[in-house]
């Protein structure tokens, strides 16, 4: 089973990158790949819960729906602790199944675990 | 066809996420693709997001490297080039439903060298690649 790491560092709003990365994640999972999504830099905003209703109100799709799909398909979603903290996001604001991880451990995943890394 | 390439050669897979001419991403990608073909690699390219604009017919930059002509050369040398149907549809390239005979979504705006395809075209490239490079996405 190919191990894919998808790193997302763009914010979920204003750019297509996050949608593009999460679509690659869910399509990879549906083909049986082992998928780890890493949210860092402005990508951490994708980890905040409570976005579905506000996005619906302005007629835009929410990345939170895609995150839930990935979790349901047994994808792993990791958020970088330092990126999260410097943007004032607390752990209790995150979508429940997201793991918070230190930068060094994330580097281990990128360098040692992932066979293919795709960055968005 | 990709499966046949995999058995014989090392495969370089490339993903382009930004459009041509606004940045040099497309140029860099095409140049390394041509070099890899010279070196005997199998080359696969996936155009994603604004990268799908690289498939537009009749590109005519006056001063810059012609990305459309480069993609045609790459395809003629055996490179496999696909583009995302969702992104292509959003940008007005797709005319109809998937056509089994030509193995692509039909388009009168995209070059024949590029097959408009589902995202699974890229998902299979992730698996088959010996090296995977992305341009314009990070």
Image: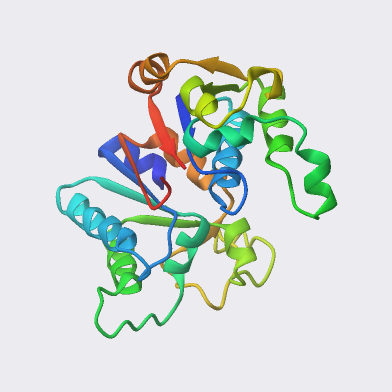
Residue shown at 72%/23% (left/top)? A72
Is B86 left or right of B36, judged from the image as shown? Answer: right
Residue at 61 percent across and 23 percent down: it is A75
x and y percent of residue A93 in the render?
70, 24
- Considering depth in this image, is A61 or B27 the residue closer to the camera? A61
Whether residue A37 is visible to the viewer of this picture, yes or no, is: no
- Frontmost residue, B51 versus B106: B51
Q: Is residue A63 left or right of residue B64?
A: right
* Residue B129, quarter of the rendered image: top left
Q: Quadrant of residue A104?
A: top left
Residue B93 seen from this side? yes
The correct choice, above or below, for B16 with respect to B123 in the image is below
Q: Nearer the viewer, residue B65 or B101?
A: B65
Asked whether, in this view, residue A49 is left or right of residue A3, the answer is right
Question: Tell me, what colour scheme is on the image?
Answer: rainbow
Q: Residue A112 at what x, y percent from top left?
A: 34, 16
The image shows residue B81 at horizontal and vertical percentages of 41, 57
Residue B109 position (above or below residue B100): below
Q: Residue furthest left?
A: B39
Name the residue located 60 percent from the left edge and 28 percent from the top edge. A29
Q: How many marks?
A: 0
What is the x, y in percent for residue A102? 45, 15
């Amino acid at each position: 089973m190919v191990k894919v790491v998808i790193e997302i560092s763009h914010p979920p709003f204003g750019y297509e990158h996050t949608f593009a990365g999460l679509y690659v994640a869910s399509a990879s999972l549906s083909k049986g790949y082992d998928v780890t999504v890493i949210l860092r830099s402005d990508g951490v905003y994708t980890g905040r819960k409570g976005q579905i209703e506000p996005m619906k109100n302005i007629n835009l799709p929410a990345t939170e729906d895609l995150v839930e799909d990935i979790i349901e398909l047994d994808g792993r979603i990791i958020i970088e602790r330092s990126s999260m903290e410097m943007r004032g996001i607390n752990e209790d604001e995150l979508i429940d199944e997201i793991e918070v991880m230190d930068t060094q451990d994330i580097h281990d995943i990128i360098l040692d675990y992932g066979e293919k890394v795709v960055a968005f | 066809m990709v499966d046949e390439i995999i058995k014989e050669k090392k495969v370089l897979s490339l993903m382009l996420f930004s459009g041509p001419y606004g940045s040099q991403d497309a140029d860099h990608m095409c140049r390394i693709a041509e070099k890899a073909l010279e070196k005997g690699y199998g080359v696969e390219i996936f155009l994603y997001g604004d990268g799908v604009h690289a498939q537009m017919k009749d590109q005519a930059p006056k001063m810059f490297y012609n990305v459309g002509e480069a993609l045609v050369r790459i395809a003629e040398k055996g490179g496999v080039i696909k583009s995302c149907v969702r992104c292509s549809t959003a940008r007005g390239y797709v005319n109809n439903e998937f056509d089994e005979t030509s193995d692509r979504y039909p388009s009168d705006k995209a070059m024949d060298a590029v097959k408009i395809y589902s995202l699974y075209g890229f998902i299979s490239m992730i698996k088959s690649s010996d090296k995977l490079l992305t341009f314009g996405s990070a």
